Amino acid sequence: NRISEEILKTFSPTALSFIGDSVYELQIRLRTLEKGNRRAAKLNSEKVSKVNAKAQAEIMEKIADLLTIEEMSVYRRGRNAKQRSTAKNQSMADYHKASGFEALMGYLYLKGEDDRIELLIDRGLTHKESDQNE
């Protein structure tokens, strides 16, 4: 565990989203690099296609049935948290779902559940990519 369960429960959903945003983006950057060395502009455009509210909302919809009761509770807290900023070129519904997804990623990271993060992202991306191929 990175942070005790007792302390982790005191974090606001926005604090969890704050760290979860970075956790998810790093996962996507690593997966993008694993596909091979390319120009930075190409790497960035691939990253941007997956690190945005719409893409994160779609991933969340794909993995919702895999979540434990605890994980779903964290997601809902993040989704329902009052947002100070507004969605930029994204729907508010997607923005709220993405905030919940980021809260979940932050929560799992702070708990030290890196394998669970990778599993959920893998499942979400696999479903997302197979949908695009149909």
Image (tube, rainbow, N blue to C red):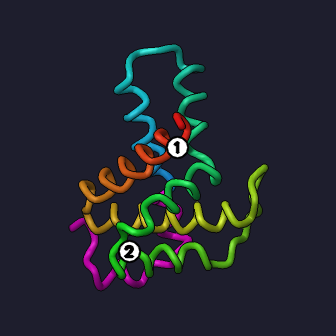
Q: Residue at x 38, y 83 (%)?
A: 9
Write the start and end of the magenta stretch as one range. 1-20
What secondary structure prevails in the magenta region? Answer: helix
Q: Residue 65's image quarter?
A: bottom left
Task: Specify few, some or many for label 1: CA neighbours under 10 Å numbering under 14, 14-19, or 20 or more.
Answer: few
User: Residue 13: within the magenta?
Assistant: yes
Q: Is residue 28 left or right of residue 115?
A: right
Q: Is residue 11 above or below residue 53?
A: below
What is the quadrant of the C terminus in the image?
top right
Q: Residue 117's image quarter?
A: bottom left
What is the quadrant of the N terminus in the image?
bottom left
Q: Compare residues 62 and 78 and report the one nearer the observer.
A: 62
Q: Amino acid at mark 2?
A: Glu
Q: Residue at x 60, y 66 (%)?
A: 97
Question: Which residue is situated farthest in the left direction here?
Answer: 1
On the image, the x and y values in percent for residue 90 come to 74, 54
User: Residue 93: within the magenta?
Assistant: no
Q: Residue at x 26, y 62 (%)?
A: 113
Instruction: Please report whichever mark, 1 or 2, sits nearer to the chain's N-terminal start.
Output: 2
Q: Residue at x 36, y 81 (%)?
A: 69
Dot 1 falls on a residue whose secondary structure is helix
